[in-house]
Amino acid sequence: MAPVPGYESAPAGAKRETITQLPIHVVPDPRRVVIRPFEPSEIDPPSGRADRVAGRVLGLDRDALALELAQVVSDLATRHPDVDRVLLERFDAVNGSIIARCTPSVDQARLIGAYFSEEYSFEAGAVLNPSIVVHPDQTHVAAGALRFILSLRCIGEGGVSSVTFRTGIWTAEGAIALDAPSPLALSPRIASLPTGEPDDGHIRLTFDRDRDLSEVVIFPITTEQRHGIEDLRLIRFIEDDGQASYRGTYVAFSGIGIRQELLRTDDFTTFDLNPLTGDAADNKGMALFPRKVNGRYAALARKDHENLWFVQSDTMDHWSGGQIAIAPRWPWEFVQLGNCGAPIEIAEGWLVITHGVGAVRNYCLGACLLDKEDPGKLLARTTAPLLRPAGAERDGYVPNVIYSCGSLLRDRTLLMPYAVADSFTAFATVNVDELLKTMA
């Protein structure tokens, strides 16, 4: 069978009593591109360059306009769905904001929209730091199997990170079958925009319902996100009344500073993104609990860039205070300790896959068990790494890094996707009973 673009077979992985590495990798595919906003650079003070670009389009005669527009549409049509909509919506976004308001013909508007757009190969560099949740649609899935959604941080031109998705089946026998990603990628409708204030970054992104989930790309839009949307820790959150929705914290990187932001979706068609406030949201590595704990929202945070903190809040949008739940103890975590995704509820307590940073900036995976009623209380932890860089998994864009943003539990087994050297994504299964035996 020919290889599926975006995936590759991997050598049979190591199998131990605790963890089994699976023979499949998700790898970057530079052919997947999305249309995103583009603005010509300006000098300071602004000289009206954007207006001059639009004016040159408006100055084209009918034949020159038709020829140039036909070439643009022809180039884009085989790589993007709904090109006309994207170009017209881009014109609407710049008209009266980036350029002086004008009333061109439809063809002039489409071409102006094209001049303020660009193709972006969002995963040309890497696909990494995955999280995984159960798919809301489990129809036609074989008994004992589970359909899932995988989120991925993708790195493209300029080292800028975006979020994309894959789907697949975790079979009853323990294998995974990933669906082939679409060759196309969708540009979202941006239903609301930030006001420009640093703490007012709420946006709503809407994608067409009749599409493959792998076509959805969430790329930076606001000033605070402009250098990357990183490390989505996606969860299926259960409200007190039993209603389920999908939420996830991620890092917005402006190129100067970072902050935690929150993604919400019910259907993977409409996504709300907004900044989080409070001292616990000022660093990387925040992960939500999948339900309230003792009537309050709960999260793990790395607010001091070293220890793993337990934090609670009456709202999902503000996180402050908290207590240290687990601190570095073993050599492989002397530099820092953090979570590798949301806490997972099991009979014994809250199971947390952790990462530790040790000598030569090696990132290893471990685990800990927190008390179910008082997650600020540590019950047990692994004394040696569950998984550490070795062999070919040492090499890549950032050597000696293994990292995950979430695992999926079925019965007493975890499916754990993880990034290798900030380059590609691999998979392993973890036997929970054997894992708990390694803890002290």
Image (cartoon, rainbow, N blue to C red):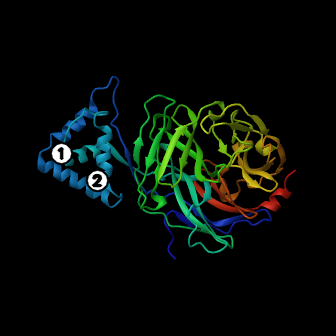
- Left or right: where does residue 150 sit relative to residue 435? left
Q: Residue 271, percent across and down? A: 49, 48
Name the residue beneath numbered marker 1.
105
Q: Is residue 348 left or right of residue 236?
A: right
Is residue 3 rendered to the left or right of residue 41?
right
Q: CA distance from mark 1 to mark 2?
A: 14 Å
**Residue 197: x %, y % from top left:** 46, 28
Task: Give the structural element (helix, strand or loop) at label 2.
Answer: helix
Q: Position of residue 166 (x, y in %)?
A: 53, 60
The outermost residue toward the bottom is: 1
Residue under pointer 2: 84
Q: Amino acid at mark 2?
A: Asp
Residue 308 circle label: none
Residue 330 in percent (x, y) is at: 82, 44
Does residue 266 appear in this view? Answer: yes
Mark 1 or 2, nearer chain start: 2
The residue at 58%/43% (across/down) is 250
Instruction: Residue at the far front: name it.
Output: 241
